[in-house]
C-alpha cells in the first residue's frame, strides 16, 4: 500500500529529473525527457508534448488508486466503515 504511493512518487521524481536533463541519456526513452524535447512543438501540435505528460499522470494516478484500494481492502476497521 505504501509502496504503491512510493512508486508513484518515484515516477514523478524520475520524470522531473528527465525534464531537467538530469535523468537517463538520449538513447534511453524517458517520459520527462520526452516532454522537455517536445515543448517546442506545443503551438503547432500540442498532443506531441501532452502525450508523455498524460502517460505520467495516468501512471501515477493508477498507482495511487491501486494503493488506496489495497489500503481499504486490507484495513479491517476501514472495511467495516464502508459496509
Image (cartoon, rainbow, N blue to C red):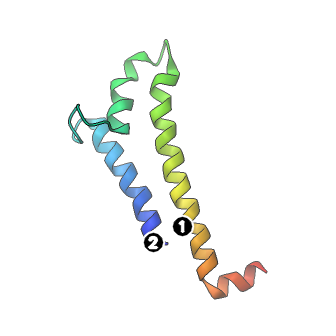
Mark 2 vs 1, N-terminal side: 2
Residue visible at 45% across and 71% down in the picture: 2
Residue visible at 40% across and 64% down in the picture: 6
Label 1 near label 2: C-beta < 8 Å? yes
Instruction: Answer left or right for 61 relative to 81.
Output: left
Name above or below for residue 15 compared with residue 38.
Answer: below
Q: Residues within 10 Å of mark 2 (few under 14, many from 20)?
A: few
Front residue of this view, candidates 15 and 24: 24
Identity of the residue furthest to the right in this view? 83
Residue 67 shows which numbered tag? 1
Residue visible at 51% across and 44% down in the picture: 57
Q: Position of residue 8 (x, y in %)?
A: 44, 57
Front residue of this view, candidates 74 and 35: 74
Task: Identify the residue under disc 2.
Answer: 2
- Secondary element at tag 1: helix
Q: Position of residue 24 (x, y in %)?
A: 23, 41
Q: Position of residue 19 (x, y in %)?
A: 32, 36
Residue 35, quarter of picture = top left
Q: Residues within 10 Å of mark 1 (few under 14, many from 20)?
A: many
Look at the image and tell me in which quarter the C terminus lies.
bottom right
Residue 21, quarter of picture = top left
Residue visible at 49% across and 40% down in the picture: 55
Q: Position of residue 60 (x, y in %)?
A: 49, 52
- Secondary element at tag 2: helix
Residue 76, quarter of picture = bottom right
Amino acid at each position: 500500500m505504501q509502496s504503491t504511493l512510493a512508486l508513484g512518487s518515484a515516477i514523478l521524481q524520475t520524470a522531473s529529473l528527465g525534464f531537467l536533463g538530469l535523468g537517463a541519456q538520449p538513447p534511453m526513452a524517458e517520459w520527462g525527457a520526452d516532454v522537455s524535447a517536445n515543448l517546442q512543438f506545443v503551438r503547432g501540435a500540442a498532443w506531441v508534448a501532452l502525450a508523455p505528460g498524460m502517460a505520467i499522470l495516468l501512471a501515477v494516478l493508477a498507482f495511487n488508486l491501486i494503493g488506496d484500494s489495497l489500503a481499504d481492502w486490507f484495513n479491517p476497521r476501514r472495511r467495516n466503515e464502508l459496509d
